Image (spheres, grey):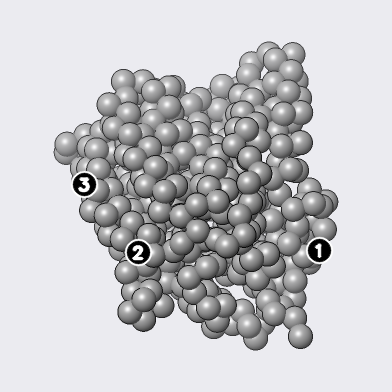
Amino acid sequence: MFSPGRRLLTVGMVLTVTLVAFESMAIATVMPLVEEDLGDLWLYGWVFSAFFLGNLVGVVVAGSAADRRRPAVPYAVGLVVFSVGLVVGGAASSMSMLVAGRLLQGLGAGAMPAVAYVCIGRGYRPEARARMFALMSTAWVVPSVAGPALAGLIGATLGWRWVFLGLLPLCGVIGLVALSGVRTIGTPEERTAEATVLRAIQVAVGAGLLLAGLQARSVVLVLALVCAGVAIMVPAFRRLTPPGTLRGRAGLPAAVLVRGLLGFGFFAADAYVPFAITTVRGMSATLGGLALTTATFTWTLASWLQARWVDRVGPRRLVLGGLLVIGGGSLSLLAVLVPSIPAWIGLVSWGIGGFGIGLAFAPLSLVTLALAAPGEEGRATAGLQLSDMLGTALGTGVAGAIVTFGSRTLDSETAGLVLVFLVAAAVSFLGAAVATGVPRRLHPT
């Protein structure tokens, strides 16, 4: 990973993850402050969902582009769009404008992991890929420690807008370093020319309509929007993912489907951990962010452990075990909502969830790279990340709809959070059942 020919690429990929991690940790930490300022609780979940919906378009477009030209091109475009989104978010005068800014951030940020996966597939030997994924997970450590504390401090003193705007200098510095490494990866010998942009947009639009329907007040409107969303989203998703994905067919299709269920189960709960600690239990935004820090530490620890175990244990066992652990962590978050239990228990509870996703996340990526045809690493990993982002967007969006329902109908945010954590656990256990189709070994003999 740090040989002279790959040193700059490795550093660039790690710094890119660091940038996205700072953004993720910081925004999640200050969102309760944003909601207090801008209002519109019903759009709270959309702040996260819009990012991931933009992300799923970005990963498909960038992955497809990286299969036709040098990966540095989609990376540079994504970095610019991401920066524009930060400006819009920092200048937002309403929650809807913030959602628009987050959509742009997602579009730009989607290019970064797509390019990173292509670079890992083409630039590193198979035996080094697991360590590279683990190293990229380690890049979350510093942001997870400094991000919540800095975001909480900046939000309480200068205001939450400077959390967005303060990331702009990092974009410039990290972008220059990363591009210097990414430009060493050339154009693939075999190029794919299939256009996927329209289908990616169809998936995002369909998911958006579905989520909008879940929050509608009229039963007729709920049915109309949900049905329209499914009708638009599902055919496009099927064309962008391996045949048999929706059925969980053994092999690559099962890995892609499980990645979506993994994202749904983990991030549906993750988006509302700070909200539960800060808004429901009345603790500081910093403590709410520290729960995410704990999860990041355990995610990183599990990532390094899976890098050591994946060849011996096999990806199937790691993915299955990780999903079961996430389900248990989601259920343990119910304790945070009990007034007689200290709110800091959320740090322990979500640390369990972080360990679970650390076990399951990278093995699915390794399976995809191992099964991808030469020159189609971008398409294969874009399908994986599409499922990941769609699952995450639906998870955070459904969670937002549930919390909104609890607030509107039951006049209880706590009741909504109970349902969110139960749904997150149920989807994680469903993912564990589908994970039996993930290959036992990365390199069958």
Residue at the (65%, 86%) spot, across then down: 312
Image position of 411 (left or right of 144): right
Q: Position of residue 297 (x, y in %)?
A: 41, 66
Q: Quadrant of the N terminus?
A: bottom left
Amino acid beneath label 1: Ala
How crowded is the residue under tag 2: few (<14 C-alpha within 10 Å), some, or many (20+)?
many
Image position of 313 (left or right of 396): right
Image position of 321 (left or right of 34): right
Specify whether residue 33 is in view.
no
Q: Earlier in the sequence, mark 3 or mark 2?
A: 3
Q: Secondary structure at mark 1?
A: loop
Return the residue at label 2: 181
Amino acid beneath label 3: Pro
Label at residue 287: none
Residue at the (59%, 52%) spot, across then down: 382
Cα separation between marks 3 and 2: 19 Å
Q: Position of residue 330 (x, y in %)?
A: 59, 54
Cα separation between marks 3 and 1: 45 Å
How crowded is the residue under tag 1: few (<14 C-alpha within 10 Å), some, or many (20+)?
some
Asked whether 373 or 222 is in front, the reply is: 373
- The image quarter containing residue 324 is bottom right
Residue at the (69%, 80%) spot, across then down: 443
| Mark 3 in CB contact with mark 1 (< 8 angstroms) | no
On screen, residue 113 above or below 32: below
On screen, residue 415 above or below 24: above
Return the residue at label 3: 169
Return the residue at label 1: 250
Q: Secondary structure at mark 2?
A: helix
Residue at the (69%, 21%) spot, across then down: 225
Q: Earlier in the sequence, mark 2 or mark 1?
A: 2
Residue furthest to the left in view is 157
Q: Secondary structure at mark 3?
A: helix
